[in-house]
Amino acid sequence: MTSNLDTRAASAGDRRRTRAYLAEFVPGIVAYVLLLSAALLWGGFDGTSPTRFAWALLPVLPMIWIAIAVLRHLHRLDEYQRTRTLTGLGAGFAVAMLASIALGILQSAGFELEGSGFWIYGIGMATWGVSAAVAGRR
């Protein structure tokens, strides 16, 4: 018979940390989606009003909340989970920076990609998730 320590199932502490993280993270994501939707609907980005800049920056506020939630989560993690999470964050950051450089050079050459900042963000987040999952399988 194997030990209970050999299981891949989350411990009670892991589940508690995950619940605490989600309790902080999910409201930030919901607020981001709502404020981004409001900004896109009513921001008047194609107009000339100076308020369009305030509308454009409005979704950044919940992203600050999300960044704080991630940092708080990192402080709650044990060494193994922290290493796994930071490996994913590091890979996501590196790939996002490479995408940023590549898109910047392509734009200098005349290639236009609508919403390139969102593409870079998405590429970084996807890489974070995949690399954290791969690091967890080791």
Image (tube, helix red, strand yellow):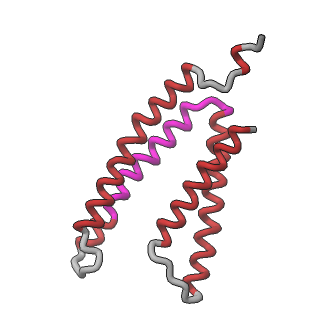
Q: Is residue 65 left or right of residue 86?
A: left
Tell me the quarter of the image containing the C terminus: top right
Region rendered in magenta = 57-80
Vertical side of 25 occupied by 107: above or below: below
Q: Position of residue 57 (x, y in %)?
A: 34, 64
Vertical side of 1 occupied by 46: above or below: below
Q: Position of residue 20 (x, y in %)?
A: 45, 30
Q: Position of residue 69 (x, y in %)?
A: 45, 41
Q: Residue furthest right?
A: 1
Whether residue 58 is in magenta: the answer is: yes
- Closer-to-camera residue (103/51): 103
Q: Is residue 25 left or right of residue 96?
A: left
Whether residue 52 is in magenta: the answer is: no
Q: Residue furthest top?
A: 1
Magenta stretch: dominant SS? helix
Q: Is residue 12 left or right of residue 66?
A: right
Query: Which residue lies at the image location 73% right of the left edge and 20% below the top edge?
Result: 6
